[in-house]
Image (spheres, rainbow, N blue to C red):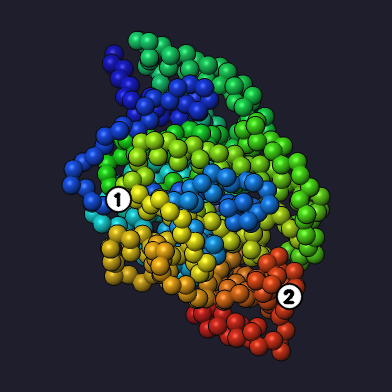
């Protein structure tokens, strides 16, 4: 009979998968105080992506609801980028640009479940970093997983989604896939990994946990903590049954500082605050205010959501952000306690935003208003103790070159992004940024049905191309005077509109 051996890693993994570490059970000494490896000079690099986190709903960026006090605390030791933009409006293009340093029209991961063109399999963040780095990656999001799978040859340890799931996944692809119908079938993870536990106090404890999980007691426990349900978890249906907790992921990240080889590059792409907005109990009804909301006209691409529905959904989204913020704060506390941030470049961002206006909710849409593309970016360098605010425009494609620049690591490859200075004395700069939404265009063909945005100084031009009944439409907004994008300034006679139109036409010409 096989001798059951359970490592500390297995145990922590199980606690994480069961979500018990944060729900009253004591977490094992999460990070050993001493993990030095002598002579190490390269910092760890950790990229933390919170999916669908819009800057518009973060108090860090001026939102009226106090949704992100812990991000604000973290900002005190970070460079905060105030005009940071995703390169697309949903996971696939946003994540691919973040990881390749080029825009969607170049990497071509533009469709739902899309992949990049072949060259980026070998030209991505994981392949660019110096040899000394141990790479690992994890995501809850199946669309991001598709991309990470593609980059797998460059990633030393790519964890499966099931690694942190309460229920393991059985790939059962049923196209068309949307981000809201993740194709997983439920199956208890614990029954697979812990079927040989039989001795010692520790193992008895695990055995008890296992039996409770198997008897659905675990789910009862979660129902008390998460009255609206667990993130992305619908046990009644056959679709969309990836069940996990953010708590488990936060504990797991903490443990990587103990367990991963150093220096490491970690890419962790967490699903919250992506819908469904299912926070822990204490965050439900956290915001019972009546915020002054601006009524915006319904858009051509409206989805029929009434202003009342949008207001209600946004409140739930904000509650969920507050929950994410609390768990982010817990992570930073744990890492600070273990002095893990003294040797780590920590990058916190999102892949795109979320919108609740003009009859549209979520991010599965053709529009490109600010809530969908204005996202957070905070970068904390090892031992950083002061806050730096950057108001120059920046893009997701800058993250890869910024990491390479910080590590003084050059690559002979063409990146569209540019390295950002993390020095308080760096001069401000202006440049043109581009955002591309082209999920309805072919991967390898012309971008004949797409929405483009160019952001230039305080102006933003949006161009809708090839849509039936909405082709060749332009909108121009002055983001300084009209941050809510209410007054469309576009006209053929407007000189700013014509200047931006020419710039955009020049950039997209090779792709249309
Ligand atoms: Zn996403």
Judging by the rendered image, the residue that carries numbered circle 1 is 43
Q: Does residue 411 sit above or below 350 in this rendering?
A: below
The local secondary structure at tag 1 comes to loop
Judging by the rendered image, the residue that carries numbered circle 2 is 488
Name the spot of residue 312 as percent of width and height, x first: 76, 46
Given residues 68 and 10, the one toward you in this image is 68
Give how far apart the Cα atoms at labels 2 and 1 are: 46 Å
In the figure, is residue 220 to the left or right of 94?
right
Name the spot of residue 354 as percent of width and height, x first: 64, 54
Name, please, the residue furthest toward the left. 39
In the figure, is residue 7 to the left or right of 182?
left
Say how many tags the image has: 2
Marked residue nearer the N-terminal end (2 or 1): 1
Name the spot of residue 260 as percent of width and height, x first: 31, 39
Q: Quadrant of the N terminus?
A: top left
Q: Are the residues flagged by discs 2 and 1 in contact, CB closer than 8 Å?
A: no
């Amino acid at each position: 009979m096989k001798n059951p051996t359970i490592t500390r890693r297995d145990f922590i993994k199980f606690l994480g998968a069961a979500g018990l570490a944060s729900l009253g059970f004591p977490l094992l000494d999460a990070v050993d105080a001493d993990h030095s490896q002598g002579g190490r000079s390269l910092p760890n690099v950790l990229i933390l992506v919170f999916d669908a986190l819009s800057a518009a709903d973060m108090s860090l960026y001026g939102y009226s609801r106090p949704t992100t006090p812990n991000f604000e605390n973290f900002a005190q030791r970070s460079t905060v980028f105030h005009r940071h933009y995703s390169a697309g409006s949903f996971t696939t293009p946003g994540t691919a640009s973040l990881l390749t340093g080029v825009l969607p029209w170049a990497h071509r991961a533009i469709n739902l479940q899309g992949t990049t063109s072949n060259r980026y399999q070998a030209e991505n963040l994981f392949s660019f970093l110096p040899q000394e780095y141990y790479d690992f990656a994890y995501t809850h999001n199946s669309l991001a997983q598709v991309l990470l799978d593609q980059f797998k040859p460059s990633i030393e340890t790519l964890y499966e989604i099931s690694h942190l799931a309460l229920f393991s996944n059985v790939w059962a692809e049923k196209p068309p896939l949307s981000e809201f119908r993740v194709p997983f079938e439920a199956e208890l993870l614990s029954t697979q990994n812990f079927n040989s536990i039989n001795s010692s106090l520790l193992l008895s404890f695990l055995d008890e946990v296992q039996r409770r999980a198997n008897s659905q007691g675990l789910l009862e426990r979660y129902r008390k903590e998460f009255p609206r349900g667990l993130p992305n978890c619908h046990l009644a249906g056959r679709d969309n049954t990836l069940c996990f907790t953010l708590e488990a992921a936060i504990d797991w990240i903490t443990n990587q500082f103990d367990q991963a080889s150093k220096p490491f590059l970690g890419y962790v792409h967490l699903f919250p605050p992506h819908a469904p907005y299912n926070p822990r109990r204490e965050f439900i009804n956290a915001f019972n205010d009546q915020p002054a909301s601006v009524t915006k006209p319904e858009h051509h691409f409206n989805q029929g959501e009434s202003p009342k529905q949008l207001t209600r959904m946004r409140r739930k989204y904000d509650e969920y952000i507050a929950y994410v913020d609390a768990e982010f704060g817990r992570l930073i506390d744990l890492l600070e306690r273990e002095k893990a941030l003294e040797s780590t470049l920590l990058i916190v961002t999102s892949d795109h935003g979320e919108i609740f206006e003009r009859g549209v909710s979520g991010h599965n849409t053709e529009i490109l208003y600010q809530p969908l593309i204005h996202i957070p970016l905070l970068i904390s360098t090892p031992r950083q103790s002061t806050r730096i605010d950057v108001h120059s425009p920046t893009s997701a494609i800058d993250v890869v070159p910024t990491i390479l620049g910080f590590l003084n690591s050059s690559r002979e490859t063409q990146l569209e992004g540019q390295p950002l200075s993390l020095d308080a004395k760096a001069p401000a700069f202006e440049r043109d940024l581009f955002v591309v939404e082209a999920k309805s265009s072919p991967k390898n063909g012309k971008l004949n049905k797409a929405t483009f945005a160019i952001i230039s100084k305080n102006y933003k031009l949006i161009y809708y191309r090839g849509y039936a009944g909405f082709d060749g439409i332009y909108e121009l907004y002055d983001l300084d005077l009209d941050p809510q994008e209410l007054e469309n300034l576009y006209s053929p006679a407007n000189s700013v509109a014509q200047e931006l139109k020419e710039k955009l036409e020049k950039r997209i010409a090779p792709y249309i």
